[in-house]
Amino acid sequence: MNNLIEVRGLRKHYGDLAAVAGIDFTVQAGEIVGFLGPNGAGKTTTIKLLTGLLKPDGGTALIDGHDIQAAPLEAKAVIGFVPDTPNLYGKLKALEYLRFMGQLYRVPRALAEDRIKRMLALFDLTDVSGNYLEGFSHGMQQKVAIAGALIHDPRITFMDEPTAGLDPRSARLIKDLMIQRRDSGNSVFFSTHILEIAENMCDRLIIIDKGQLIADAKVEELRRMQGRDDSLEEIFLKLTGGSDVDAMVQELANDA
Amino acid sequence: MMRDTALLLRLYWRIDRRDRGGLPVAARAAYYLTGLAFAAFSGFLGYFAGQLVTAPGTPFALAEGLVPGLLFTLLLLGLLFTGFNQALAALFLSGDLERLLVAPVDSKAVMTAKLLGRLPSMTIILLALSAPALLTYGIGTGMGASYYAGGTVLLLVSPLFGLSVGALIAMLLVRVLPPRRLKEHLGAVYIVLGMLLAVGIQVPRLMGDGEQIDPQSAQALAGVFDTIGQLPLPSMWAGRGLVELGHGQVSLALGGIAVYLMITVGLFAVTALLADRLYLSGWLRMQSSGMARRGFEEGAGLFGSSSLDATLAFKDWLLRLRDSRQVATLFSGVLVAAFFAFIVLRPNRDDGLLSLSQSAGAFPGPAWFSALVSPGVIVSGVVLFAGWGMFNRAAINALALEGRAFNVLKAAPVSARQVLASKILGVVVPYSIVVSLLLVAGRFLVAYSLLWMPYAWLCLLIMGYGLLTVSTSIGSIYVRLDWEDPRRMTTQKAGLYNLIGTVTYGLVTGVIALIPYLLAATAPAGTLFYVVLGLLVLLGVTWGLRQWLSRRVEMVWPALGS
């Protein structure tokens, strides 16, 4: 199989805190991989390490065969990245931003224009494409960020909470886009807290907690490993030590 | 309501204190020292004004009440800006107002606490700037004890005026402009006012002849001040009342002071009472206005260019020209450059540097000395400084312009070196155009050797490139990507190192550029050789510096934005 992402012993510390404590995994071409974990588990740090936004303290990450640290430009050229917060240039118009992204990723002008028009139509942004991004709502900015990340047809798309703040239509659109990217032989690696999306969309799930990988399997395999026919939510809570949530809520209700 | 107000005020004042206390020790020390310097200057001005007003036989005869009146008026203007900014931040940009308004808390308590949230900071600044002047003016004019008591009350009440009127203006303006845009414009006004003040302070010193002001002019000036003093402003009445209080004329004093106090406290009370209604109606207007929809625009401009450098530079200029604060920063650079050029050239003045240089040939001395202070050298120096002054800030802030969108660039397949190159290109191209035009214009203004003009032009281009490379690189190394205030787009170290770097580079390359010219003055036969050699050395030094600085930026790049 063709590994588009190959992670070996990746580590990142913030002071004494091990945000990512030596993780290993691979993502193959034509896969959608969901990256799950509780808040502060190290998901965003891992994605930032894989996209070259952060420098690791140890380990390697190969992106389509290129080491993100040793050959960052080659690796980044095949990556599309959607961060958890769409920090865009507020003083650019949506259209200008997308054209800028096309240039940044060296997409030929005619091809970029064609893709921009299709993306704008797809995300229902055509009639505001001449507006400044600072006037956009969070959801609209998120859609522009996703369009910008896909403008160069990346081999691997990293998305950090891509559906956060999106309306149901746009969230569905993202899901369809992910499937379309997988079907065309590319991969999608995304983090989410919405387990229903993870369960329905992902070919494989990677679960991280306190910087360590605690599961890397298909949903069915996870169920088999847990030995019961639990929902993904139950499995997730057991793996991440959150299974006492019900008891805590009951205790709170009793106090009230 | 009182309980809710007290609870919220305790919270806001704690936040205010932590904001002030959160600085590193060195920054805090610098902050306090600056405050002390301002206080000392304020005290000096107050005492000087007191002496001026009471000096026997002074041609500059002013009413005693005018100075405190002017002080209160300036103070209120300053407080108005601060209050406007505070109201905008607290009411429309804080994010916690909706949460508070849906809580079981009296909305008037929320508004009162919001308006008074920064009162401690404002009072401290106010006391540091105004109290010394008021105090020393009292000493200088021999006021009684009641002057100081009355002055303290008036000063302590003053912030209420700024907070209330500023809040009212903010609440009215958000109906027309979005709060963030308003905040940008306010930032731009601060930048321009700061620069005008800095330049304005220098004007009398630099433009004056060093002679004493004549009695007629002094009387005319005093007349202007008297007219200002007669304006129906409560602050002027308060000033006069305070002086009357200082002279024991209590019954006369009470009128002016009482009106001032009533207006100030009354305005605050009205604002606090109306604030929730005004806020909500302003908020509704903001929501209902929506945004005009602008559809697809054909033509990609420079975003369709094949050069990534041009694309990045074009994007930067769009960001600059669409942000009034960045435009104000650019304008400030132009203002400083123009002011400097005017001071050096000083047409029709005998003591201007240019006039001195033009008469240098008249003095006995070696040929190289005459060459050193020749008009061509002076004009070239002025053009270099003017061009650099115009684009220096843009260069330092070039990477910071990315702001929180920096990760868009960092995640893209573009190297730190290329980003730096595009940032430098973005300022060097307009710099080159400006200095070329200025050099040609300078030739029309001042006659100097046309033969040396190409050499001067090449030197200016290379040196400007070097200077702007230093500024861009240092601004990139010490960048702040989470800036809100455009005056703080880089850390304080950037300003210091940029000063050291540009002065050092400017001096070294200035000497290198001058040597061929000076050698040619003493041994003209080798002129071409000197010129070529000079340009090669200049290029070599600049190229070496560029390589070293690029490497430094590459080293810090992985840590940026994380």
Image (cartoon, coloured by chain):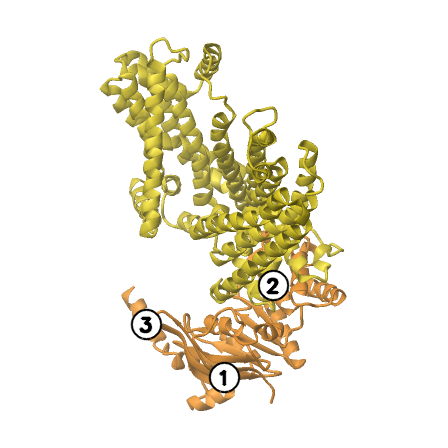
Marks 1 and 3: which is nearer the front? 1
Quadrant the N terminus of chain B occupies: top left
What amino acid type is highlighted by mark number 2?
Gln
Which residue is found at the position 59% from the left and 50% from the top? B463
Which residue is found at the position 50% from the left and 30% from the top? B200
What amino acid type is highlighted by mark number 3?
Met
- Tell me the number on the disc at residue B418: 2
Q: Is residue B212 visible?
A: yes
**Percent position of residue A251, x then y:** 30, 70
**Sequence order check, earlier mark of 1 and 3:** 1
Give the letter of the chain under mark 1: A
> In the displayed structure, does residue B242 sit left or right of residue A115?
left
Task: Look at the numbered disc 2 and give the secondary structure of its residue.
Answer: helix
- Tell me the number on the disc at residue B443: none
Chain letter, colour orange in render: A
Q: On the image, numbered disc 3 is attached to which residue?
A: A248
> In the displayed structure, does residue B184 sit left or right of residue B142?
right
Residue closer to the observer: B220 or B286: B220
What amino acid type is highlighted by mark number 1?
Phe
Which residue is found at the position 38% from the left and 43% from the top? B110
Q: On the image, numbered disc 1 is attached to which residue?
A: A25
Chain letter, colour yellow in render: B
Q: Would you place residue A229 above or below residue B53 in this image? A: below
